[in-house]
Amino acid sequence: MNKTLFLSLILGITISMYSQTKEIPLWDKVPNSIENKDYQEVFRLNSKGEATGILKVINPRLKVFLADTNTNNAAVVICPGGGYGVLSHDKEGDKIAEWLNSIGISAFVLKYRLPSDLIMNDKTIGPLQDAQEAIRTIRRNAKEWHIDSNKIGVIGFSAGGHLASTISTHYNDNVYASDEISARPDFSMLIYPVISMEEGITHNGSKVNLLGKEPSEKLIAKYSNEKQVNKDTPPTILIHATDDGSVPVENSINYYLALKENKVPAEIHIYENGGHGFGLGRFGTHLNWPKACEDWLIANKFIPEKEVFMFSYFKGNGEDGLHLAYSEDGYTWESLKNDTSFLTPEVGKDKLMRDPCIIKGGDGLYHMVWTVSWTDKGIGYANSKDLINWSEQQFIPVMQHEQKTRNTWAPEITYDEVNKEYMMYWASTIIGAFPETQSTEDSGYNHRMYYTITKDFKTFSDTKLLYDPGFNVIDATIQRQNNKYIMFLKDETKKPVQKNLKIAFSDKLTGPYTEASEPITGNYWAEGPTAININGNWIVYFDKYRDHKYGAIQSKDLKTWKDISDSIQFPKGTRHGSVFRIPNSLLIKIKKNRPNNPVKVYFILYF
């Protein structure tokens, strides 16, 4: 075997194992090909022996980097640069794929054929054939790869940018016998791209490699992609540096102007410095381009906005109202608004706001319920678009029909996505009910979980029993996992002492739920659980109320639990709350918001 080829194969295996990805061939039979046994694929090596580029690609393929998500996400075909003479597959391929994965996008590094008369009947269409088939391959496999077939884009660098702009303007060109699956990208990101083949603006090496030394004016015009833009060209973001000495910035400017003229959504970022081939950036203002692309993708709804975690809680007895804290990792929490109240309680006997539970509903509003009193027969409710401005507070008399009701504590809401309705549930003690677990401990409270259903928070179903586990139960919170519901709950039994958290399961939100599990918390008193899944780990936060601090446990399988209380940090005095997600833009808005304090005007009269 050829020594260079052998080294290339070994390097290829190493790189593939390192990135834990796979490569798939694009073609069963490569179209437009000429068999040439002397034409062998090899790697370009740097002074350290590292593979930085691929020469003489003969078997076009996709290197697959699937995003770590179970929901349908966007995908991007990556076209590395290299002047149509080499593929810079590492800097402008694998590293770009890893960045795209980090923002939730599945990535596919396209190892396309470099135009050559030695292996192609028509070298000008070889790269385009591979790019078209790459888009079609992803669309064919979209369901299996959890990809949204309407959010498949392309990113290209330098000559790879020319190929990306070519597939964006020539996606309908009939360059091989294909099925009817669309090859049109839904968006394109062009990074210091070659766009034009026109003299004085093009990158001459790319032009010669693709079109030959003496191309016709017709061929030059055809592959000067700024001239091929029309109203159906995909939305595009362009990145370039003013001091690019290889590919003049006018390539991006002219393409942008063509997009603008055809009313195609477009954005351009021209940086003062950076030169050519800066990849993910080395210095200067051009370091910001990945964030610019991410923001553009979010603004155009190709990827969801980054989310942060929010925690609603109360302090003291709940008399001052709602407090909020945020976290970017779920471990370190920082209070907002200097740990002052966002909403002062106005309803109920005692006008308290204890145990505030907030969820985001199907209507996009944040819905909150809370405990209004120690002895009332109803709960508080309000909603908000932004967690800053709240609706008028309501008192919902969920237990008014039961004269012997002593309390309605720790209410929660869960949204039923299937039935498009909300279940509100809480703990109540009804005097005389469940005598088998009645005790004189804890002031004689003997709770069970109750619920009501609503679609609009104006009309409610009759209150029903939700859960009787055979013991005094309180502080239930319910999360959905796939097609099952998980109830985290507190065993309130004091004699023999429990005061711990357990879990139960159901196929339906309204139950029936299984018997409660063994305790999942340790040898301390825990209450007020709230749970969230972060990167495949369930984290349950709870109030270690005898220790006057917050604790947490973590599990991947909901069976084996690890106490991570020493790894979390909450604002001092945090009491029984709930965890939920919000978009980062909303957090920024909340941070910028300042209470509108009334201006005091003093008049001084002189006599």
Image (cartoon, helix red, strand yellow):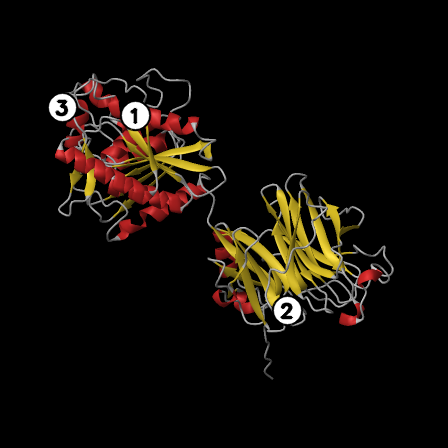
2 and 1 marks in contact (CB < 8 Å): no
Q: Secondary structure at mark 2?
A: loop
Q: Amino acid at mark 3?
A: Asp
Q: Categorize mark 3 by other alpha carbons within 10 Å: few (<14), some (14-19), many (20+).
A: few
Q: Is residue 249 visible?
A: no
Q: Looking at the picture, tell me which residue is in the foreground, 483 or 299.
A: 483
Q: Secondary structure at mark 3?
A: loop
**Marks 2 and 1, how far apart at CA:** 63 Å
Residue that carries the numbered disc 3 in the rendered image: 38
Residue 130 disc label: 1
Q: Residue at x 63, y 66 (%)?
A: 526
Which residue occupies the foreground of this view, 76 or 19? 19
Q: Amino acid at mark 1?
A: Asp
The residue depicted at 26 percent of the width and 36 percent of the height is: 80
Which of labels 3 and 1 is toward the front? Answer: 3
User: Which residue position holds label 2?
Assistant: 525
- Residue 443, position in %: x, y? 78, 71
Mark 3 or mark 2: name the one nearer the start of the chain: 3
Of pointers 2 and 1, the one earlier in the residue sequence: 1
User: Can I make out residue 466 in this image?
Assistant: yes
Q: Quadrant of the image for the N terminus?
A: top left
- Give the quadrant of the C terminus: bottom right
Q: Residue furthest bottom?
A: 607
Q: For the residue marked with disc 2, what is the amino acid?
A: Trp
The answer to whether residue 563 is above or below residue 113 is below
